[in-house]
């Protein structure tokens, strides 16, 4: 039986989504047909669609209806997480042909890495890349040649963008295929230690680069539990991966077996007219995603991405849903930055199968959802194995192999989830409390105001950041500069905290899903560019951030605030490095608490 709080959250989402969900499903019904849609195309159109196919595939697409599977991929060979996808299309086509169908590479979508662009101008394109990927996915599917979709993507904005784009073609079934994490390298704690030493000038760039290269050393996702690996876990919790597919390393027999099995399953879904993606993913699916995110202390970015994804499907999530669930969902994992382990250690301890089994048993997940496995979520409380070269599933172990990493509901790391929503006269913000020690989860200190993370770094280098303070970094919201992550601030503020200062961050920007240690109230809405009170904060103003009370307040008399002229953004920050191309996005984008999306804003 579903926990009453989870049932109540779901009921509220269904009620507030009634009109938009009905409109979305009506759109799906309008697009759905009994046979392949390509047979409604003119002969010239269809000939264009299969002109480059091998002769056997061309003959199949000309003849009696057979499924044609679209491949949409985020492959590029620069980024470790997406490099493994290079050979997936060929393997998928081989498996699909063996199943009596055809697969075509429908289109590629961009994939950028926040790890490369952190602190650089390119980071200001990061969030907008999500909606660009959604648009690119829709373009890839626009040829109307397909009966099912396989989406290949892993990292931060790529998976949410693929979900949004695929949901716009939600009359088709869709499976997501992961690439898996790289093998474990330099431990996360040691990597963070060296980063802080570099920030203090105690080691040189060569030492830092050697540490980073030892941590990020091969194909696959980075092994910490940031947005990329949160994406992968959520795809499984939402039933968009095959059970157990998420955390197997690239190049392994298991990884190849999952890719082949997903391809063959897509053919089966197309042949049997299975539940299409848009009907499969509903309010219950998104509640399951929220619960899985909270139970694992996942990325704060998903307080934006899940809202944006849901809105494409006509489902209206908000931060109240995250906050209500966080009150009763226990924290069951300690994966960096919430601990020292990485996702490979999590997988070895029992992984997603153990996690889902525990959450289902406690009534914290909806079991009665549709999934690409063709069963309810209970099919995901399993462990995948290779038997004679093929995948088979068995019940997952009853005990965690390492309770320092993964625990049962009966012995959680914390009785509350990993995220907290704050509200007050400054607006609303999100805190990743699971990564912050209890002693640092409240602060009452004067403000130090900065217009950029570079300005804060300059003040740190000059030795100006003394005493207790709340660093206010504003004009970092979606309308100001595309809402970049401010992950470069973590080592700086971490150094000050280790020196005994009480410090925190308040910003209308984002932090990486890998951020932790220092109290950070992020995604502040309304942002400075939209008239948020953060634009009126001055140095020395008293700010109180209290995660226990859930409050976020500026202690300045109202008449004083009203008399102040709001600050303005620094000029010239929206030009160069391609940023000028996204001026229209900045004008259209919604607020962070509404998904920070041009799609959400226009739907």
Image (cartoon, rainbow, N blue to C red):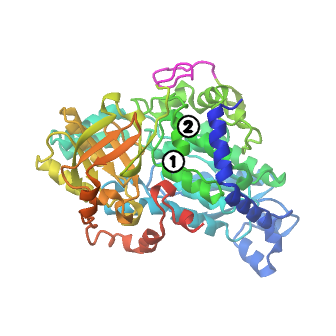
Which residue range is magenta in the image?
397-413
Image quadrant containing the C terminus: bottom right
User: Label 1 neighbourhood size at 10 Å, few (<14), some (14-19), many (20+)?
Assistant: some
User: Label 2 neighbourhood size at 10 Å, few (<14), some (14-19), many (20+)?
Assistant: many
Q: Position of residue 350 (x, y in %)?
A: 57, 26
Q: Nearer the viewer, residue 56 or 337?
A: 337
Tell me the residue that label 2 is attached to. Answer: 325
- The image's mark for residue 593 is none
Tell me the residue that label 1 is attached to. Answer: 319
SS class, disc 1? helix
Q: Position of residue 85 (x, y in %)?
A: 56, 52
Image quadrant containing the N terminus: top right
Residue, x 80% and y 79% (percent of image)? 42
- Hey, which quadrant is residue 576 in on the image? bottom left
Q: Can the viewer see residue 249?
A: no
Q: Nearer the viewer, residue 491 or 294?
A: 294
Residue 302 highlighted magenta (yes or no): no
Left or right: residue 274 compared with residue 480 = right
Farthest-out residue, bottom = 44
Q: Distance between the Cα atoms at labels 2 and 1?
A: 10 Å
């Amino acid at each position: 039986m579903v926990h009453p709080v989870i049932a109540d959250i779901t009921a509220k989402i269904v009620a507030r989504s009634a009109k938009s969900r009905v409109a979305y499903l009506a759109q799906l019904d309008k697009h759905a047909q009994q046979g392949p849609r390509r047979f409604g195309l003119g002969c010239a159109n269809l000939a264009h669609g299969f002109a480059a196919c091998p002769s056997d595939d061309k003959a199949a697409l000309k003849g009696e209806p057979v499924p044609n599977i679209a491949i949409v991929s985020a492959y590029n060979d620069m980024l470790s997480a997406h490099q493994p996808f290079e050979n997936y299309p060929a393997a998928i086509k081989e498996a699909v042909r063996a199943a009596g169908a055809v697969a075509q590479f429908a289109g590629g979508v961009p994939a950028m890495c926040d790890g490369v662009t952190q602190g650089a101008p390119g980071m200001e394109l990061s969030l907008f890349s999500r909606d660009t990927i959604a648009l690119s996915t829709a373009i890839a599917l626009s040829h109307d040649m397909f009966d099912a979709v396989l989406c290949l993507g892993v990292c931060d904005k790529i998976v949410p963008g693929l979900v949004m784009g695929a949901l716009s073609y939600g009359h088709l079934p869709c499976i997501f295929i992961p690439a898996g994490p790289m093998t474990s390298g330099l431990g996360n704690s040691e990597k963070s230690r060296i980063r802080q030493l570099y920030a203090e000038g105690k080691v040189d760039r060569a030492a830092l680069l050697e540490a980073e290269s030892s941590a990020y050393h091969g194909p696959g996702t980075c092994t910490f539990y940031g947005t990329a690996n949160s994406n992968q876990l959520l795809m499984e919790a939402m039933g968009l991966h095959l059970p157990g597919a998420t955390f197997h390393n690239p190049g392994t027999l298991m990884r190849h077996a999952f890719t082949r099995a997903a391809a063959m399953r897509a053919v089966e879904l197309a042949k049997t007219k299975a539940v299409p993606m848009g009907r499969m993913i509903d309010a219950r699916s998104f509640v399951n995603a929220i619960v899985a995110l909270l139970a694992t202390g996942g990325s704060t970015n998903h307080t934006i991405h899940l809202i944006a994804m849901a809105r494409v499907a006509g489902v209206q999530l908000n931060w109240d849903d995250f906050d209500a669930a966080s009150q009763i969902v226990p924290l069951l994992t300690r994966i960096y930055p919430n601990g020292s382990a990485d996702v490979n250690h999590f997988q070895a301890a029992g992984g997603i199968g153990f996690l889902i089994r525990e959450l289902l048993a406690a009534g914290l997940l909806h079991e009665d959802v549709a999934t690409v496995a063709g069963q309810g979520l209970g099919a995901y409380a399993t462990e995948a194995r290779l038997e004679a070269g093929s995948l088979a599933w068995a019940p997952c172990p009853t005990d965690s192999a390492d309770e320092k990493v993964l625990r049962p509901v009966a012995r959680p790391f914390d009785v509350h989830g990993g995220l907290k929503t704050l509200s007050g006269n400054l607006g609303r913000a999100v805190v990743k409390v699971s990564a912050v020690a209890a002693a640092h989860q409240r602060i009452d200190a004067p403000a130090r105001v900065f217009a950029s993370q570079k300005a804060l770094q300059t003040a740190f280098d000059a030795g100006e950041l003394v005493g207790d303070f709340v660093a206010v970094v504003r004009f970092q919201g979606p309308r100001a500069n595309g809402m970049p992550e401010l992950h470069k601030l973590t080592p700086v503020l971490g150094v000050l905290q280790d020196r005994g200062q009480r410090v925190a961050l308040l910003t209308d920007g984002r932090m990486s899903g890998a951020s932790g240690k220092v109290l950070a109230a992020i995604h502040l809405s309304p942002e400075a560019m939209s008239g948020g009170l953060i634009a009126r904060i001055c140095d020395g103003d008293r700010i109180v951030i209290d995660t226990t009370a859930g409050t976020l307040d500026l202690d300045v008399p109202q008449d004083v605030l009203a008399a102040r002229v709001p600050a303005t953004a620094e000029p010239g920050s929206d030009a160069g490095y391609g940023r000028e191309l996204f001026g229209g996005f900045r004008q259209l984008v919604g607020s962070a608490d509404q998904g920070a999306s041009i799609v959400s804003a226009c739907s």
